[in-house]
Structure formats: structure tokens, C-alpha cells
Amino acid sequence: MNEIVQFENVGLRYGAGIETLSDLTFTLYPGSFYFLTGASGAGKTSLLKLLYLAQRPSRGLIRLFGEDAVTMPRERLPGFRRRIGVVFQDFRLVPHLSAFDNIALPLRVAGVKEKDLTTPVAEMLDWVGLGDRAEARPATLSGGEQQRVAIARAVIGRPEILVADEPTGNVDPEMAIRLLQLFEALNTLGTTIVVATHDIHLLSKVPGAQMMKLEKGGLSDPTGSLRNPPLPRDRA
Amino acid sequence: MLSLFVIPGHDRRLIPEGRLSGPMPWVIAIMIFLMVLATAIGLAFTEAGQNVSDQLSSRATVQIIEANPDLKAQQTSDAAARLRGMELVEEVRVLPAQEIEDLIAPWLGQSADGGQDTGGLLEDIPLPALIDLKLAQPIGEKELEALRTGIRPLAASARIEPSSALIAPVIALVRSLQWIAFGLVILLAIATAAAVIISARAALNTHKETIGVIHLLGGTDRQISRLFQRRIALDALLGGVLGLICGAAIILLLGMQLSALGSGLVQSLDLSWYSWLIIGAIPILGMILAMVTARMTVMGALKKIL
């Protein structure tokens, strides 16, 4: 099975401080579902930043879609980023754009024609339960609604990898389950999912998902093996 | 460049555009206004210098310096006749004595029979006779030598002075003023570019979060910089047109006032149609300058982000 993400002895240091992430070695496979757990400050967000190419590591090797992401020229990064969907912990919605325009943003950035994006965006708005809030600006949405817009924006482009940082942190349990079902549906279609969470209960909601646990910047299992065999969801 | 203005509406909304809401269009309006004035002055001096130079480049004055009035008259007549016979001479005019006296009257006053009391001073001064020449071509060393050779046998003390030599200091001054004006245009263009850099950096800072999101969603530097370019180009165009209208109004007003003066060099400070064309292009050039500066600033800043 070809790996979609490969980390080898990856370390990340901000400035001259101590390493936030140390000696990370693991492999993610296409079509798999991963939970990334760990206490606050364990380095989950930093690891996700490396995954969605917001940061380059201080050392080590990262291969993404079979290519070296560490030495990749800056001009090639946008093309790779379009293959990765991201749900940011702080949502990062564009404040002066409506929910519709925020969700449509990745498609527009990718050059999708206006007539081709209206239907999928409207369907996505309906799916996350915000069909009647299409024109609402983020400031007028609740925290949970903003989070759903952020998730819809991350998945609208059918990314090959979806990286979500605490995606259910601001939603009620019922919506959390619906969102996880959306992630599972995407996963079934072949998207590799990486969800960072400190909510242990979520793990049981997705049977067959793999778990990576971070402790003080390193994987708790230094051999890099995961809790479950790294098989795609449809084979798990 | 046209593609700059056909960015889809939804893309334009990524960076909010407050038309004329910020100081940028007004700063550019002032800069363009000053540039229009400086350019107009520079072009007017260029044209005036060229006109005067063209008018005088083929003219010369022959001075017949002879104390004996009879001999002077004879030499003048002979020299004029010889000059009229020369192929390179197009026009010969012997200046009447009264006209010569009028020329020096501002310094020495009128002669006794001219109505002013000069104590008969002009009668006592041996004024040279003057012959005004217009040649068929601009006067160079070769033409001067031909003229000298032609009249030397008739009037050994005759002096030939090309008119351009007399006006040379004025032309030099006009040229200096012209270059000062164009220097000012360059300085104003640099100041405009600096204002655009400051504005672009401020806009980048204001929209840092949005830019970060667009980047992480796969937006390219080019996509992002186009948004800023468009906004700044439109601001520059609006400001530029405003500056041009004000500047052109001032130039027309000054032109009318100068025409009313009716004096030689000043009257020639009129602008030709191609000068107006250059002045009319200033807002467009200002917009291109602003656009290129904004692009370079934004691209430079984005390159510092991963």
C-alpha cells in the first residue's frame, strides 16, 4: 500500500526554544481514519501544521503524496495545499464573507466556475444544517455554526487528506456525531482523515479508526506503531 | 493589464474595497496634480526653448564698425549688396539708424531729435551699422566663415555674430528650468511609489488573516497580489484623474494669463497638442507605477510567508 504521508525523525522547533515535536516517525495510508490525541500542549496543532504545510520541520523528512515536502519549492506548495482540507481550531473564517462565500472559497481559489459551485456549496450548507444561514456573516453565527462552516469549507473540495483540529470542540454531542458521520462518509470515498482531539469518547464513535497519541512532543509509542493496523477504512 | 479589472466579483470581495475611503486616492491625486504642473512647466520650457532656438538658429547680425559715417554707409551698402548675392543668404535687412537708436534707448536714452534730452550723447557715440541676416540653413562655423570671406574685402572691421550666441544664456536657463521640472516629476513619482508601498504594506497587515487563510487553502501569491494590485490601481486611477483635472485647470488658467502678457518668450510658453497628450497620460502612467509598485511590495511580503 502506498503511503500518503510519511514522517521520519521529524523535529520542530520554534525559534531558539526547545523542540515542540521530537523524533516523529510514522506513516499514514490512503483512505485511513486517524485520531491524534494528547493533552493540551502535547504538540497536536504543531503536528497538524506540518501536515497541512503551514510549517516546515526543523529537521527530519516529510513525504507527502510521495514527494519530499521539506525541500519542496515554495511555488509548488499551493498545488499540494489544494489536496488537503483543513479545519482550523480557531475556524479562521473570512469575517467579511458570508457563510456561502466562506465555504465556496477553496473552490474559487482552485478556479472552479461560478455556475459549477453553487449547487455543491448549497448542498454542503444543508448538510451542516446551515441552509438558511447562507448569507450570514461569521460574526452573526454562533461558535458551533462557525465551526460547521469551517468544516464545510474544509471538505467542499473533496480533499485527499482532511486535517481537523478539535473539529467538535464547539458543537453539541448530536452535531458532533453528525460531523463525524460526514468525515466517515468522506473517508469511505477515499479521503484520509486526521482528527486531532482530546475527547477520548470520540474515538469509540468511529470503529476501525487508528490512534496516534502525542506526549510532550513525541509519539507515546516511540516505534511509531499505531493502536490499530493502518488499513484503509473499507478494509478495517 | 485589462485582466486586472475583470477579476470576478466574488474574488474582489476577498479584500474589502472602500472606494475613496482611505487616504490613498487623495495622496495620489495630490501627487498627480503636482506631477501634471511640473510636467507642463517642463514641456512648456522645452517647447519655448525649441521655438526660440529654431527662430534664431539661422539668423545672424553683421556689425559694420567704422567711425567715419560716410565710409560706414558705403561699407554697409556694399556688404549688404554682396550678402544679397550669396546663395546661402535668404534675407538681408539693413537696420535704419533710428531702429538702432531705439534698441539702445533703454540704456542711453533717446537722441536729441528723438525728443529725450541726452545732451547729444548718441550723436557723439560711433554706433556700428547693423545688417540682419536670415540664412537658408542653421548657422555653423562653415556658414560663418563663408559670410566672413564674402564681406571682409568690403568691410575689414565687420563682425558677424550668430543670433543663437546672443540668446545662448537664456536658452541655457530655459534648459536648466526644464530639467529641474522633469527632476521634480521623477521625485514626485518616487514619492508616489513610496506612498503606494506604505499603503500596500498597511493593507497587507490589515488583511493578514484573510491572506493566511487563502494561502492555506491553496491560493497562490499571484492570486493574492492581483487583489491588492486591482484595488491600488483603481485608487491610483481615481486619484490620478482628479489630480489631472485640477492640474489641467490651473495650466489653462495660467496659459490665459501668460497670453495676456503678450511678451515674446512668455507668450511662447503655450503647450502643443502632443504636450497635452503627455500630460493626459500621467494618470495612466501613475496607475501603472502604483500597480507595479503594489505588485512588487505584495509579492515581496508574501514570499516571507511559507
Image (cartoon, coloured by chain):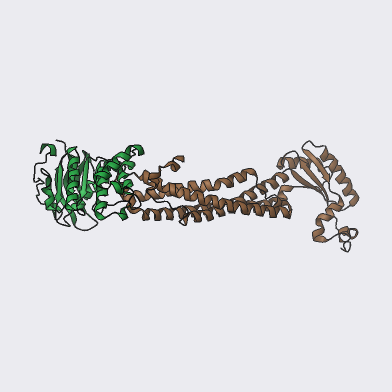
Q: Residue at x 25, y 40 (%)?
A: A83
Quarter containing the N terminus of chain A: top left
Q: Residue at x 17, y 57 (%)?
A: A41
Q: Chain B colour? A: brown
Q: Residue at x 16, y 55 (%)?
A: A42
Q: Is residue B127 visible?
A: no
| B252 versus B107 height, above or below | above
Snapshot quadrant of residue B151 = top right
Chain letter for green, please: A
Residue B93 coordinates in the image, percent (x, y): 83, 44
Residue A57 coordinates in the image, percent (x, y): 22, 49
Q: Residue at x 78, y 39 (%)?
A: B89
- Relative depth, front residue between A48 and B90: A48
Residue B199 coordinates in the image, percent (x, y): 43, 55
Q: Is residue A172 visible?
A: yes
Quarter containing the C terminus of chain A: top left
Snapshot quadrant of residue B218 = top left
Badge count:
0
